[in-house]
Image (cartoon, rainbow, N blue to C red):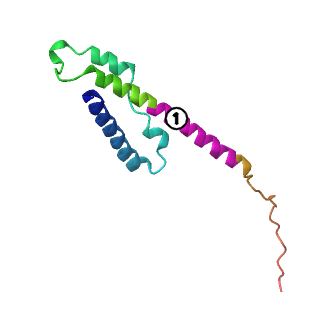
Amino acid sequence: MEVALISGLILVSIYVIRFVLLRLFLGSDIVPQLYVAPRGLITVLLFYAIPHEAEVAAFEPGILLFIIIATSLIMTFAMVYDKKRTNKALKQAHGTPVGYTRWKAPSISPKSTD
């Protein structure tokens, strides 16, 4: 239970910090970028490459695994949601044709010299 609580707090902090920074620098449309958090195989490899003398005794390896799995699932669901949102926007854009007018060259009318 302690591993889940610590992992949950780390997840919340990751996404809150990302939300604030992305909102500050990118504006309001941050949906796909918000949920792509750094995680993965390199994190695990670096974790296991830590020398025994430098390890923190109180750190549970399950925290790392929980964060990697949770961020992967969150990212997957966010990407599926964004794909549906993009397809909906494209269908709406294709359904609304863009109007145009024919270009007509300007004509020069002779000026009266009265």
Q: Position of residue 113 (x, y in %)?
A: 83, 82
Which residue sits furthest front? 1
Mark 1 highlights which residue? 79
Residue 82: quadrant of the picture: top right
Quadrant for the N terminus, please: top left
Q: Position of residue 27 (x, y in %)?
A: 44, 51
Which residue sits furthest bottom? 114
Near-viewer residue (62 or 93):
62
Near-viewer residue (104 or 36):
36
| Residue ID at (27%, 27%) | 3
Quadrant for the C terminus, please: bottom right
Q: Position of residue 97 (x, y in %)?
A: 75, 52
Which portion, as a residue range, is magenta?
74-93
Q: Left or right of 42: which side holds 85?
A: right
Residue 5: quadrant of the picture: top left
Q: Main secondary structure of the magenta part?
A: helix
